[in-house]
Image (cartoon, rainbow, N blue to C red):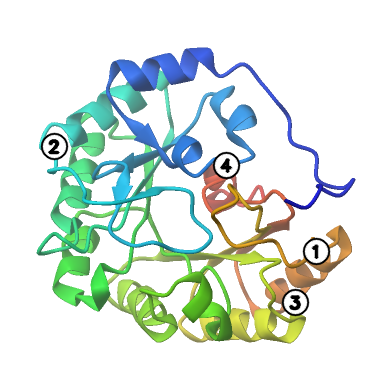
């Protein structure tokens, strides 16, 4: 794997307390499963992005480190355990994501909804953000999540259309846009999406994706550097320089995004509460 450039510095922090709490509730986080470079700073706050529906994905995206195999049965007690852990961590803002579960009739949408309801019962004052898969474009499934009332609906576009076949072979760019558009049309006030760069895209292609997202009234945008989590994942084609991330941020603001986080170590759920509050 390529050596990280000087402008990418990953901080190592003691993760024990947060990891112990999560294990005590038998919960997974995307922070751990995806080998996020920001896990130290997030776990030390503490905060975490809860990953529901197990830790095995039915898709095999080229950039992702999450396991790909036959998934386990859905645990009906998981939503309550997420809520209990969030309360124990003292979270004011709870981010919930999942693996993709194409094996389930609704893609796991009802489980997302139950998790939202459980968090609302135990933490009625906390904000809730969901980062969902595309549910294979099933709007009835998506409706279950929307009706549960998350404060922010996030679905990552991940990369530019030209690279989908390599990066997200079981996904579809137009379908992901449709999911975000329909969420907004269904009453979600704040929608969000994220992009990785460094996979071989051009500057102009990234800007075109920004335009597509604004055309469907997407409110928040994150742009971060793709970092290869293992040798079995796609290689990094380019380490994008910090000044390019600043240019992306400036263009995104000009296009009308309410908030933009753009930088080498930016990730979709990183500082999620700060972004919604206008502190990013």
Q: Are marks 3 and 4 in contact (CB under 8 Å)?
A: no
The x and y percentages for residue 100 are 30, 58
At 56% from the left edge and 48% from the top edge, which residue is drawn?
A: 277
Decide which of tag 3 and tag 2 comes sooner along the chain.
Answer: 2
At 36% from the left edge and 74% from the top edge, which residue is drawn?
A: 170
Question: Judging from the image, what secondary structure is the residue with disc 4 in?
Answer: loop
Q: Are marks 2 and 1 in contact (CB under 8 Å)?
A: no
Q: Is residue 117 above or below residue 239?
A: above
Q: Is residue 175 above or below residue 130?
A: below
At 28% from the left edge and 21% from the top edge, which residue is drawn?
A: 25
Q: Which residue has dot 4 on it?
A: 36
Residue 72 versus residue 254: which sits nearer the camera?
72
Q: Closer to the observer: label 3 or label 2? A: 2
From the viewer's perspective, is 266 left or right of 176?
right
Q: Are marks 3 and 2 in contact (CB under 8 Å)?
A: no
Decide which of tag 1 and tag 4 comes sooner along the chain.
Answer: 4
Decide which of tag 3 and tag 4 comes sooner along the chain.
Answer: 4
Q: Which mark is residue 114?
A: none
Q: Which residue has dot 1 on it?
A: 240
Q: Which residue has dot 2 on it?
A: 75
Q: Closer to the observer: label 3 or label 4? A: 4
Q: Which residue has dot 3 on it?
A: 251
Q: Closer to the observer: label 3 or label 1? A: 1
């Amino acid at each position: 794997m390529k050596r990280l450039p000087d402008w990418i510095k990953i901080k190592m922090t003691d993760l024990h307390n947060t990891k112990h709490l999560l294990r005590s509730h038998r919960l997974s986080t995307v922070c751990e499963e995806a080998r996020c470079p920001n896990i130290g700073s997030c776990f030390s706050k503490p905060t975490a992005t809860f990953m529901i529906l197990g830790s095995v994905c039915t898709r095999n995206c080229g950039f992702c480190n999450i396991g790909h195999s036959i998934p386990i049965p859905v645990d009906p007690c998981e939503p309550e355990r997420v809520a209990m852990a969030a309360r124990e961590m003292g979270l004011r803002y709870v981010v919930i994501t999942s693996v993709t579960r194409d094996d389930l009739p609704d893609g796991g949408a009802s489980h997302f909804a139950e998790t939202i309801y459980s968090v609302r019962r135990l933490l009625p004052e906390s904000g809730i953000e969901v980062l969902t898969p595309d549910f294979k474009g099933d709007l009835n499934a998506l409706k279950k999540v929307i009706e549960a009332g998350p404060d922010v609906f996030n679905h990552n576009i991940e990369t530019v259309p030209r690279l989908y076949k390599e990066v997200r072979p079981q996904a579809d760019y137009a379908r992901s846009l449709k999911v975000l558009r329909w969420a907004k049309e269904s009453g979600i006030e704040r929608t969000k999406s994220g992009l990785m760069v460094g996979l071989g895209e051009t500057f102009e292609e990234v800007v075109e994706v920004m335009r597509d997202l604004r055309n469907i009234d997407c409110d928040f945008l994150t742009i971060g550097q793709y970092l290869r989590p293992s040798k079995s994942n796609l290689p990094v084609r380019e380490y994008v320089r910090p000044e390019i991330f600043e240019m992306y941020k400036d263009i995104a603001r000009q296009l009308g995004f309410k908030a933009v986080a753009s930088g080498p170590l930016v990730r979709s759920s990183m500082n999620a509460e700060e972004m919604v509050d206008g502190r990013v």
